[in-house]
Image (cartoon, rainbow, N blue to C red):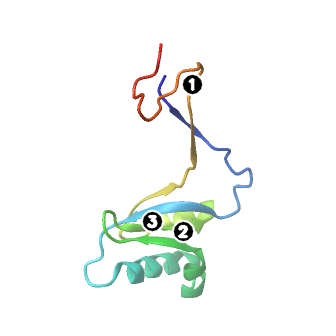
Amino acid sequence: MAASAIPAAESVDSSKPAAHIVHTERPQDEEPEVYHLRTLSAVLGSEEAAKEALLYSFKNAASGFSAKLTPEQVEAMSRQPGVLQVVPIRTLQLHSGPGKSHVRPGNPQPST
């Protein structure tokens, strides 16, 4: 049986900041992290708050950043110029289905 992804428990308090990925247009005339901090500062009110909330700047395969945002900040971020999409980061836990057969190295097919 194939492994399946099960969402981890969601946070009950929706007013607390949660990690989100903010997909943006690729900046043309400035470094990605500078652009990301400027975009985040426009919503959070200061560069200091933006630096505290910023988790990671994506620069190569994707353009965007991850940051801790409240639901209200997610709404405001979604309306910022250059922001394409804001999505929550979800932690997935993998588990195998019922049964005793598992795929192991050296035994690529589950036994029947």
| Three-letter code, disc 3 | Arg
Q: Dot 1 lies on which element? A: loop
Q: Which residue is mark 1?
A: 97
Badge 3: how crowded within 10 Å, few (<14), some, or many (20+)? some
Which amino acid does the dot numbered 1 rest on? Gly
Q: Is residue 82 above or below residue 101?
A: below
Tell me whether circle 3 and circle 1 mark residues in contact (CB < 8 Å). no
Task: From this view, report whether residue 111 is shown above or below residue 66.
Answer: above
- Left or right: residue 108 versus residue 44 is left
Q: Quadrant of residue 55?
A: bottom right
SS for dot 2: strand
Residue drawn 63% across and 44% down?
Answer: 8
Residue 67: image tag = 2
Q: Residue at x 61, y 63 (%)?
A: 72
Which of labels 2 and 1 is toward the front?
1
Dot in front, 2 or 3: 2
Residue 12 image position (x, y, % from top left): 74, 50
Dot 2 or dot 1: first in sequence order is 2
Q: CA distance from mark 2 to mark 3?
A: 16 Å
Q: Residue furthest left?
A: 28
Kind of element beneath mark 3: loop
Q: Earlier in the sequence, mark 3 or mark 1?
A: 3
How dense is the environment of label 2, judged by Cα within 10 Å: few (below 14), some, or many (20 and up)? many
Closer to the chain start, of discs 2 and 3, is: 2
Q: Say which residue appears at 43% left-offset and 72% top-offset.
A: 57
With respect to residue 21, does 7 lie above or below?
A: above
Give percent across and percent down for residue 44: 57, 77
Q: Position of residue 4 (x, y in %)?
A: 51, 32
Viewer-nearest residue: 109 or 32: 109
Q: Amino acid at mark 2?
A: Ala
- For disc 3, the marked residue is 79
Report if the CB atoms under discs 2 and 1 are less than 8 Å apart.
Answer: no
